[in-house]
Amino acid sequence: MAVSKKSLDNVKRPRESAAKPAGNEVAERARINSETAKIAWKELQRFFAQGVAIYVSPELDLVDVALEISCDRTDKLGVWTADEKVGQVHDAQAIEWQDTNALLWCVVVKPWVLVQPVLTEPED
């Protein structure tokens, strides 16, 4: 799936959110991991409609991306966005997920809802 080249500003947390100190990173990672779940796309469509659904490539670790956003660290996020591995969900992708009743990994990092396709194991 190709993610459009949105500016990093479209994916960063709003200015009113303060960065979390590095000392809390372990606790923040644990919190994010505990709040990650598989959810059907149909349950996430309203977040897409609101413009807050963010695609995360299956090549990346969803928790790592969420942690970078949560801690307001934009260096890696900028690279991922430029490489089209993170960005807003496109209409075409939303339609495909709707048509296939897709199951996605999801985690909320306010105000964003990060979504990542669940990879299926190949059948033997």
Image (tube, grey):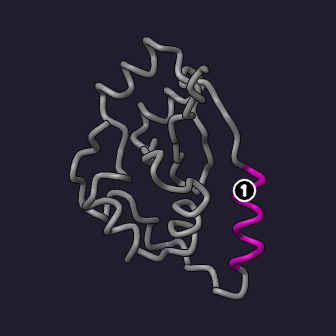
Q: Which of 120/71 is in front?
A: 120
Compared across the picture, whether 101 is left or right of 37 comes to: left
Q: Residue at x 70, y 40 (%)?
A: 37
Q: Quadrant of residue 71?
A: bottom right
Prevalent SS, magenta region: helix
The single residue placed furthest to the left in the displayed view is 5
Residue 16 vs 63, above or below: the answer is below
Residue toward you, 122 or 33: 122
x then y, percent, for residue 124 = 61, 20
Numbered range of the magenta stretch: 25-35
Q: Compared with residue 7, is residue 44 higher up or lower down, i.e. above or below?
A: above
Residue 31 is one of the magenta-drawn residues? yes
Q: Nearer the viewer, residue 95 or 60?
A: 60
- Residue 81, x across and y down, in percent: 31, 59
Residue 105's image quarter?
A: top right
Q: Amino acid at mark 1?
A: Asn
Task: Say if 52 sits above or below 120 in the image.
Answer: below
Residue at horizontal 51%, vertical 35%?
117
The local secondary structure at tag 1 comes to: helix
Identify which residue is drawn at 37% across, 38% down.
Answer: 89
- Quadrant in which the N terminus is drawn: top left
Residue 3 is left or right of residue 11, and the answer is left
Residue 122, x across and y down, in percent = 56, 26
Q: Position of residue 34 (x, y in %)?
A: 78, 53
Mark 1, residue position? 33
Residue with the most extreme front position: 124
- Inspect the magenta stretch and tell me whether residue 114 lies in it: no
Specify few, some or many for label 1: CA neighbours under 10 Å numbering under 14, 14-19, or 20 or more.
some
Q: Number of callouts in the render? A: 1
